[in-house]
Image: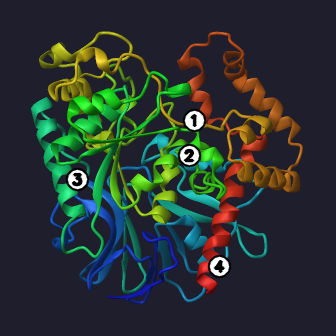
Amino acid sequence: MDIRYTQIDNLPPLTWLAEIKNGIVEVIHGKRVETTENWFVEGAWSGEFVQGEFLDNDWFCGTGAKLCGDKIVFSTPSHVTYGLFAKKIVRGGGYRISNSLFLLMSKAGFNLDSQYPGYETDFNSITKGIERYNPHIHVVDRNGNDDNVDVYYFRHIEIDKNNQCVISKIKKVTPFADFEDYYKRLIDDMRSLYSNAHDSNRKYRYGVVTMISKGYDAPCCAAVVKEIGGNTALTFSAIGKYAEDSGVDIAKRLGYQNIIEKDADAYKSRADMPEIKYLCSGNLGGGISFSVFEEEYEGNLVFQGERGDSIYDRYSKHRNDEFHIINMQSGLSESEHRLWLGYIPVPMPLYGASAWPSLYDIANSEKMSEWQMNNTYDRPIPRRIVESAGVPREWFGIQKRGAGFSYHFDWMKRIVSRMSLKSGNDFSAYVRKHRKPYVIQKIRFFAETYKVYLNRIGLKIKRDDIEHLSSTPNPMAARYLIPWAGEHILKEYRQILER
């Protein structure tokens, strides 16, 4: 096997696409993808950079591939907030594999289908776990015929010199014995991750920043990042939805000297349609509010509390070792955006998530009784970490708020009101061009989700009675958000490849 590289400076800096055929691997990539004779990678892992041992690493935040004898092995991250996309080449054999769905689609001549109602559901099916998610993304070819692209999470893709492909799962982590075991492994691997990310042997070195709030997960991230040497914390300004959620006081208590507050709605004043790179990945909203921190994200490891609400929940009924997380968005909103901006998301609560049952046992153990609040918002593991770092108990983890938003249940007017002006106008024009009635689908949707709208007009509906409805496909204007955003991303990739 032989890897050949072509750097295209206009590509998003962390994007790559490999074409594998008869033992030759042709890779096009952006300028921040690390390349060697035997492996390439975008991201960081808990190990020495020069060794390139990211395959089956307990904590790999990124994607890449490595030559192993007479085969090349591609790897997704060891979490599930983004994956890899692949398509067998019909003429001549071989495969295309990429960390960007849209770069692969550009090379293969595919488009998204403006009338397909299931994109959000298909993308977010990873919340069903690594054994039950939908492994295909629906596309149409140049002639308008139906086709699909394969998507892989928590997997290795092995291809040999004869174009034979074998798919295998990444190795799961060893269960944690107790809190001390979890915390030691967490700190050791996060410190190693940071060391890897700013190793002097890299052509591009990364810093580290963390989000912080008054919940559980972000303060936990901040406590860990401070322990491994970080000094920049990001939080939303205490206005609107975040009036009681600013993490400034906690960041100061943890010893952060660079604390940055920004308005979560500031993206609305932008003229470059920031929503596009978040929406194209499958989440209807998700991370758009976080786009206000793009300047701080670029070139850094970005620690986030993704999925902690389930992984750390003392009362979770659904713990498992397959990343099956109930009633939550997939966390995919950054999977394309990160490639263009050039940063490495670190969803820290997913560290060791393949050993989730052991974390549940730790949270409910007698040794953790001092940090068990015995209420409905009880997360003993992050509470112990944050309190042990010197933050008073009453300062955090009192009321669940959550960050970001979703367009999932929105109608046209509400969607546009939560967009930047240019995006709203552009999306409105797209919908006018492609809209079809879908009366029966709309009736079914409202019949299933009416409780959500009753809740919005002031009637108290139990959260458990409406959270699961986020997996119900929305046939209204929201159905067009992903193909609208995808059309723009495809246009950008095609313009780059044609230069």
Amino acid type, callout 4: Gln
Location of mark 3 (residue): 58
Left or right of 383: which side holds 236? right
Residue beneath the point at 71% across and 25% down: 448
Viewer-side residue, 272 vs 440:
272
Location of mark 4 (residue): 495
Left or right of 496: which side holds 318? left
Gap in angstroms between the C-alphas marked 3 and 4: 38 Å
Gap in angstroms between the C-alphas marked 2 and 4: 25 Å
- The image shows residue 353 at horizontal and vertical percentages of 30, 41
Task: Say which element carries label 4.
Answer: helix
Amino acid type, callout 1: Phe
Whether label 2 touches label 4, CB < 8 Å: no
Gap in angstroms between the C-alphas marked 3 and 1: 31 Å
Q: Which mark is residue 374?
A: none
Residue beneath the point at 32% across and 21% down: 396
Residue furthest toward the front? 257
